[in-house]
Structures are given as C-alpha cells and as structure tokens.
Image (cartoon, rainbow, N blue to C red):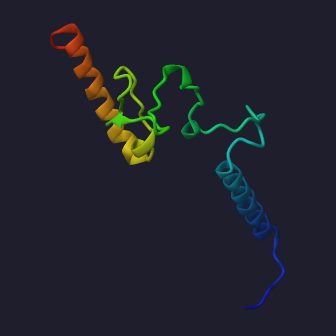
Amino acid sequence: MRFTAMNRGQRGKLAMATAALAIGLLSLTGCGYINAQQTTEQYSSSDGTRTDLGPLQLRSSHGGIQLDGTTAVADPRVQLVGYGPSASTIGANRAGRAAAVAVRRRLERLVGGSAA
C-alpha cells in the first residue's frame, strides 16, 4: 500500500468521517458527559430490604421458620416469598404465584365466599 499526500478535498472528507465517528461513539456512551450524576449511592432492587421478624415469633424450636409453600406455619397470615426454596429468580416467580393463591384461599375462608 502506498501513501500519498492528501489534497484539500480528501482532508475534508477525512475530517467529516472522523467527526461523525466521534459523535457516534459519544452517543453510544450515554449522557454521562453532559448530565450530572443523579446519585452516588448504589442500590440493587434484588438486594431487598432487611426487616426484623423476631416479634412475629415465627421460628420453630429448630431455629428456622417452617413453611408450607410460602406460608409460615406458625402464623398463616405471613407469606415469605423469596425466602428459603423460593429464593431463586425462578423460585420467586413461582412462589409469588403460590403466595397469591394462598392469600386468596385464606381470604375466601375468612369471608366465606368467593374473593374475586
């Protein structure tokens, strides 16, 4: 390959191509160079929240919380979704559905009819 001197038109085309490439790359990197950062605190919704369940007295004599599906055996009003076997993403989806069904059944028993 042989390099030759560029004329004025070729330099202009090269400058335009370089500018277009630079604009394209900046548009792919987001607005971080233009806009201020909204927050510096990292948060992942999958981290969940920490809550003290001690006052509910759900623990069995073995130290854990015994579940029937997602329902706490010690207090059937409590649904623990994302705890124990339902802690995985797939398990949480299934557990969410199971918890909704369990709550509906409990409400139907309490109300004595169909909860729609």
Between 50 and 31, which is closer to the camera in this rendering?
50
Q: Position of residue 114 (x, y in %)?
A: 16, 14
Residue that protrudes farthest toward the bottom in the picture = 1
Is residue 115 visible in the rendered structure shown here? no
Q: Is residue 21 left or right of residue 36?
A: left
Say which residue appears at 30% left-offset and 22% top-offset: 103
Say which residue appears at 76% left-offset and 70% top-offset: 10
Between 14 and 10, which is closer to the camera in this rendering?
14
Q: Position of residue 49 (x, y in %)?
A: 58, 31
Eyeballing the image, is 3 above or below 35? below
Eyeballing the image, is 84 above or below 19? above
Residue that protrudes farthest toward the right in the picture = 5
Q: Is residue 27 left or right of residue 47?
A: right
Eyeballing the image, is 59 above or below 23? above
Between 48 and 51, which is closer to the camera in this rendering?
51
Q: Is residue 18 left or right of residue 91?
A: right
Number of marks: 0
The quadrant where residue 35 appears: top right
The image quadrant where one finds the C terminus is top left
Q: Position of residue 115 (x, y in %)?
A: 21, 14
Say which residue appears at 71% left-offset and 51% top-offset: 26
Q: Position of residue 48 (x, y in %)?
A: 56, 34
Is residue 100 visible in the rendered structure shown here? yes
